[in-house]
Image: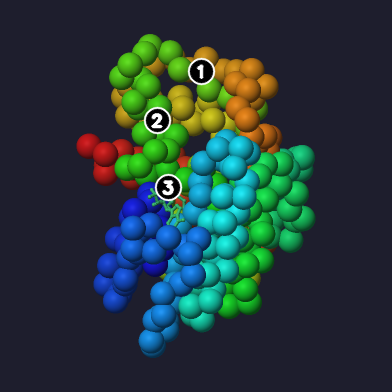
Amino acid sequence: MTGAGGQLGRALQEEFAAEDLVAWTRGDWDVALPPPLLDPPPGLVLHAAAWTDVDAAEDDPQEAAAVNVGGTRHVAELGAPLVYFSTDYVFDGGKAEPYLESDSPNPLSAYGRTKLYGEGAAGEQAWVVRSSGLFGPSGKNFVTTMLRLAREQDEVVVVDDQRSAPTYVGHLAAATRELLDRPFGVWHLAAEGDCTWAEFAEATFEEFGVECRVRRISSEDLGRPALRPANSVLRSEKGAPELPHWREGLRACLQRIE
Ligand SMILES: NC(=O)c1ccc[n+]([C@@H]2O[C@H](COP(=O)([O-])OP(=O)(O)OC[C@H]3O[C@@H](n4cnc5c(N)ncnc54)[C@H](OP(=O)(O)O)[C@@H]3O)[C@@H](O)[C@H]2O)c1
């Protein structure tokens, strides 16, 4: 697998611990460089390495593409079936209903474009897993950031006009394993339910018993460099493995943090 040092990579290592898994960090293989020669080729590659800094990709789209598109092409060159992790940010957010696998992508950001082109670079022997708002007990994610801010201040400002399904990495890893019995192709694997980031921050403080106010603002007020979709709730029309609700994800995360 690639991306072993990332938050999803760590969850995948736990889920696939019983398998003969080789876990590559960036130090083992920078995927922007050609792949190592593996003889025999692996039976399966879980490709969780990516440029994930959405705002920084606006300033450096070439470097982001070198990792997310070129890197995925390199992984496909290993010649094994692969799982490529993609994102809700391939959509423009203009749909009123949840996005299905058959909906047309139209990314608003450089990051979203690189991840979409990466889907193509994954090739024919690939499960393309689109998920959203990943969080887990370690690494830099919305939950760990909110908990850190709550230790430093009594109020956080959070956008209230982006709706998605924040997904716990442990639940995504388990659903990924189940997906391997399904055909190759694009699959939406995200938590049940949906919320705005402000609602998710409030729920995080509630579940973790933390006192901190949430001031709701708009994406325009926040003024981040990259545009994000207003609605990027993902659902499957293909009978994808189902994930628990995002609240259950928060509770599972809480047990791992304490
Ligand atoms: N985070 C989300 O909300 C979200 C939502 C939907 C989909 N996804 C997708 O899910 C996957 C996993 O995301 P994540 O949240 O686990 O991200 P993450 O915690 O940022 O992990 C990404 C990993 O990729 C590694 N990496 C970056 N550039 C690399 C390179 N050139 N060669 C090898 N490794 C490299 C990073 O290593 P360093 O730490 O050394 O840079 C890091 O360990 C990604 O494909 C992402 O696009 C994420």
Residue at the spot of label 3: 168
Looking at the image, which residue sits at the far bottom? 40
- Amino acid beneath label 3: Tyr
Left or right, 37 with reference to 219: left
Coordinates of residue 59 in the picture (x, y in percent) = 61, 37
Number of the label disc, if any, that sits on residue 238: none
Left or right, 134 with reference to 18: right
Residue in the image at 51% along x and 41% along y: 53
Q: Earlier in the sequence, mark 1 or mark 3?
A: 1
- Amino acid beneath label 2: Thr
Coordinates of residue 49 in the picture (x, y in percent) = 45, 57
- Amino acid beneath label 1: Val
Q: Earlier in the sequence, mark 3 or mark 2?
A: 2
Left or right, 232 with reference to 242: right
Residue at the spot of label 1: 157
Number of the label disc, if any, that sits on residue 145: 2
